[in-house]
Image (cartoon, grey):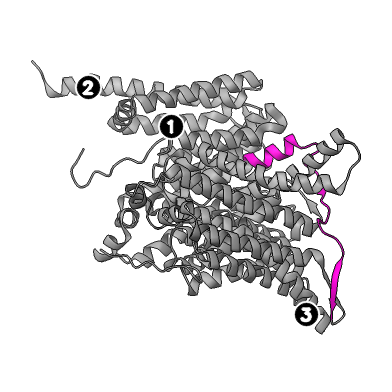
Amino acid sequence: MTELLLQQAINWITLGSIYALLALGFSLIFGVLNVIHFSHGDVAMTAPFIALAGAQALAAVLGAAAPAWLALAVIAAVFAVGLIGVVLDKAVIRRFRDAPAMMALVATVALGIVIRELIRHLYPQGSNPHAFPRLIGGVAFDVAGVPVSWFALAVVGLTALLVGLLFGFLHLTPIGLRIRAASQDRVVARMMGISDGRVFRATFLMASSIGAVAGLLFASYAGVTRFDFGVMAGLIGFSAAVIGGLGSMPGAIVGGLIIAGIEVLAQTFVPEGASYRLVFVFMLVIAVLIFRPAGLLGRTILEKV
Amino acid sequence: MNHPASRVVPRAAAAAATTILLQISGAAFVYAILSAEEGWQVVALLGLLGFGFYLLERLPWINDVVVALLARVPVVTTATAAVIVLGFPFLVGSNTYILHLLIVAQLYAVLALALNFQLGSANIPNFATGASYGIGAYVSALLAVNFNVSFWLTLPVAALAATLFGFVIGIPCMRTRDTYLALVTIAFAVVVHQLLNNFEWTGGPNGLVGIPAPTLFGHSFADPIEVFGWTLPSQANFYYLAAAVVIIAVITARRLHESHIGLAWNALRADEMAAKAQGINVAWYKVLAFAVDAFLAAFAGTIYAFYVSYISPDNFTFLVSVTIMTMVIVGGMDNIFGVIVGAFLLTILPEKLRAFSDYRLLIFGVIVIGFLMIRPEGLFPQRLRHYGVER
């Protein structure tokens, strides 16, 4: 029993970290643009495909497939996805920042369709699932007879590092200060001479690169990637960001951990829990929002008249 | 002598002629796009449509003139519309594919009108219309398959079940707002879909098969219709049934829009705080919007289930709700005609893009984004209410 619990705890913290990274992107973008970027999950899930394609291209040009090519391709994919985010912002998403909220939601859902279909058409045999290797293999050490993999450690470590970097970036750099100002009040920020364009670019670059890391880790965790993984990744990341409280970074992390927690619990302790796991996840989402309508760590805004 | 009547009569006649002409050309356009088979035909017709909306965008007075014309001779407008709707199957003849598209488009029009009460009138996002649609379909199908209940009895039962579901979703929505509210409805949609997919008594992922065709006065809906020597394929039964429900939905929407309920919803949309201050029971009207939406969606669901005689959870996913949302937003929120146009356009478009086989979803997504960017208010924006004063 202890072993099972320990094993599930490791799964929980790994999956929770990945979800938290996804949720961070939603929260960041919402904080600045007040727009739900529903295709964020799809953007994130382009990363494994770009990495696979990059590794194959490198192997074809430089000969002999080597792990180094994959590592290189993975890093390139993170940057590429960051750029994709910036381009999508400039081409589509930014235009909806002052539109009614639901319009932006529908536009980004349509954008998600476009991204998924592009993956399907541009990647050879894109409709099929593609195996994605464990980026880091091997067992680090045993805890009470339960092996802790390097991969789990790397996921948690990388998440902690990224969160730390993001926090430092937002609080210690000039552009971070501008992003925080714009997320508090975009109009006043503009009056203070903060250029919208730069803030949006920086936000999307960060959110999409962090999403790319999450996408790569998720594909690596699942061992497989498919063009439509983005739908679920988007739903889960969005839910995590919302139950944590949109615009709140700690909230996104808490939300990710909670959702991963209920998923792992359902799979472990409920008979046939694996097929009902989404029911549990979204029941929890409803329950949280009934009792905390602005999310767990969200600011409840009192409307003044 | 300038007798008032003599000035009115020719105007009315002109208005009537233009009205009839407009509606017939509209119907002709629908027929043309439905029967277009080559890729270039579809592209040309879409180009024509795009040009039309471009004109509307540049010259907004066209819209006002047309609306004024249609309102000038309401009887002629209604009569022409009735003739067109009744006569369309005769024009289509034995082409069951076109009839099928029209039935699906009409069912989506009902769903979009249902959602319009919330999204359009009250600006409440709802991603669970697909779930209400599914509940309607499953309740009636289960009753028909397991207990042999007639179609006409399952219709109200399914509507009642879905309305209860609407109330259930409505309750958490009293507290949440905007994006948070959107997530609650998304969560309900996912939960319903997953449950349908996992329960054994709903047939799991395989769904329910062999839903019997309805009968009316001894005429089975699986049989072709024969009138005055014409034979219409069996789909025509469902075409007329769906048309009847669209008409019910339109009348309901109009009546509600003109009632104090519609006014209260519009007040909610304008400013919730102000509405509350005016003594409007905000929570009740929000929940009511969910219930009305679910009620109408269940009608569409029941007809769908009996029409295709086979349903599976995949017909009622979260993405179906998104499609319905898109129809309302692209068509024009709170504009009944616009919403119907949106539903027809977005049902027929992906089918017609089959000419581009594998790329159709891609093109569909691009077109939706394009519409939202070019006409952000929707194809037919909502019109201002005229309070009190007779137009």
Amino acid on which the number 2 mark rests in the picture:
Val
Q: Quadrant of the N terminus of chain A?
A: bottom right
Residue A14 placement (x, y as % from top left) = 73, 67
Q: Chain of mark 3?
A: A
Question: Closest to the observer: A181 or B23?
Answer: A181
Q: Is residue A57 left or right of residue B273?
A: right
Q: Are marks 2 and 3 on the same chain?
A: no
Residue that appears at 41% across and 42% down: B336
The kind of secondary structure element at disc 1 is: helix
Q: Quadrant of the C terminus of chain A?
A: bottom left
- Residue identified by numbered label 3: A5
- Residue identified by numbered label 2: B9
Residue B174 placement (x, y as % from top left) = 42, 67
Bounds of the magenta span? A114-143
- Disc 2 versus disc 3: distance between alpha carbons? 85 Å
Graded by Cα atoms within 10 Å as few (under 14), some (14 to 19) or many (20 or more), the crowding at tag 3 reads few
- Residue identified by numbered label 1: B81
Q: Is residue A139 left or right of residue A118?
A: right
Cβ atoms under marks 3 and 1 closer than 8 Å: no
Residue that appears at 57% across and 27% down: B90
Q: Are marks 3 and 1 on the same chain?
A: no
Q: Does the segment drawn in magenta span residue A119?
A: yes
Q: Nearer the viewer, mark 3 or mark 1?
A: 3
